[in-house]
Image: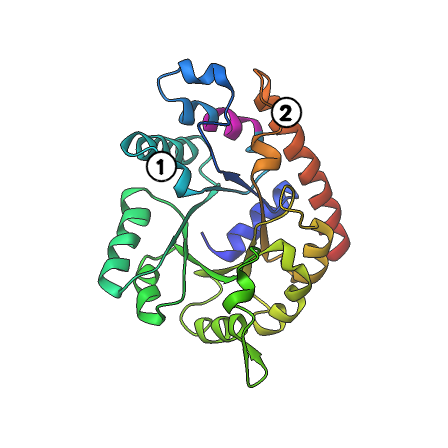
């Protein structure tokens, strides 16, 4: 999927919503535990209820890896279900991988060949050769960690040398590795005030913005500071949507929560584009 195709989906749905499938078996409705695959059963209902509000889904792999083989099976079924039923959806593996080149090559093979994700989140710390293998897959995306929302981001990401913060250096250097059709950047919504500066460095790249909703990020601030002429962002919401309800009507509650976010996004698209 190219950036133009992704923007086409955004325009068609009037939404730049990415629903995070952070599916915790300890938090899903209890009645689903009687099914053969509770995690997939939950995901399926969430996807069916929100697919017309979202342009992307982002399973966080930690929630699946914690369940061992069963979790990987649930993840694979989830991706296959989206691919078959909603083929225009953008699917992100929130895996945060990053290792030496030959290992990264295997990570890329796992997520792009074996599981058919559109994108994978990658940590840039080990440099260009640890990221390059992901670019060998045509039509697939690297989503590079740039500026995160957690408190510990201050430990390294804001360290300044010669007037340049580390995260700014990471963005400037890594922008030379890929292009606007195969690289995005993660920028946390709780750091929305930094988005305007980031846009000066990478005006045309897509941004994946987590932290809106339960983590306290403002969608208005994110749009105001981070949108470009083609929107140029996917805003992720996980807990606010998928855990909006805990009873048998959890999917209906999730749809209502997603609709509320989508409606705000539609207004912001009209306002800033």
Which element type, helix, strand or loop, lies under badge 2? helix
Q: Nearer the viewer, residue 201 or 216?
A: 216
Quadrant of the rendered image containing residue 140:
bottom left
- How many numbered marks have been drawn onto this rendered protein structure? 2
* Disc 2 crowd, CA 10 A, few/some/many (<14, 14-19, 20+): many
In the rendered structure, which segment of residues is drawn in magenta? Answer: 43-49
Which residue is situated farthest in the left direction here?
Answer: 102
Which element type, helix, strand or loop, lies under badge 1? loop
In this rendering, the answer to whether 96 lies above or below 255 is below
User: From where the camera sits, is residue 273 visible?
Assistant: no
Say which residue appears at 40% left-offset and 36% top-offset: 83
- Taking the magenta stretch, the answer to whether it contains residue 256 is no
For residue 253, which numbered disc appears in the image?
2
Residue under label 1, please give it.
66
Q: Position of residue 79 (x, y in %)?
A: 39, 36
Q: Provide the major secondary structure of the magenta segment.
A: helix
Mark 2 or 1 closer to N-term? Answer: 1
In this rendering, the answer to whether 207 lies above or below 244 is below
How far is disc 2 from disc 1 in space, using C-alphas? 26 Å
Q: Position of residue 121 (x, y in %)?
A: 42, 54
Q: Position of residue 86 (x, y in %)?
A: 47, 34
């Amino acid at each position: 999927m190219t950036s133009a195709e992704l923007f086409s989906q955004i325009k068609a749905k009037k939404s730049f919503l990415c629903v995070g499938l952070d599916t915790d078996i300890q938090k899903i409705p209890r009645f689903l535990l009687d099914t053969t695959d509770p995690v997939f059963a939950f995901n399926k209902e969430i996807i069916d209820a929100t697919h017309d509000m979202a342009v992307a889904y982002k399973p966080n792999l930690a929630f699946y890896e914690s369940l061992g083989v069963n979790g990987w099976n649930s993840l694979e079924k989830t991706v296959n279900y989206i691919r078959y039923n909603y083929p225009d959806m953008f699917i992100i593996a929130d895996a945060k991988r990053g290792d030496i080149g030959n290992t990264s090559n295997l990570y890329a093979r796992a997520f792009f060949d074996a599981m058919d994700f559109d994108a994978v989140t990658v940590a840039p710390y080990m440099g260009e050769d640890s990221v390059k293998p992901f670019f060998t897959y045509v039509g697939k995306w690297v989503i590079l960690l740039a500026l995160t929302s957690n408190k510990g981001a201050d430990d390294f990401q804001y360290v300044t040398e010669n007037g340049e913060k580390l995260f700014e250096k990471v963005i400037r250097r890594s922008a030379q590795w890929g292009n606007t059709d195969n690289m995005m950047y993660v920028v946390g919504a709780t750091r929305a005030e930094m988005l305007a500066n980031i846009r000066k460095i990478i005006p045309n790249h897509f941004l994946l913005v987590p932290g809106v909703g339960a983590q306290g990020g403002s969608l208005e601030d994110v749009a105001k500071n981070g949108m470009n002429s083609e929107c140029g962002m996917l805003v992720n919401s996980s807990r606010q949507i998928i855990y909006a309800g805990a009873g048998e009507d959890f999917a209906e509650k999730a749809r209502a929560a997603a609709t509320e976010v989508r409606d705000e996004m539609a207004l912001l698209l009209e306002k800033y584009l």
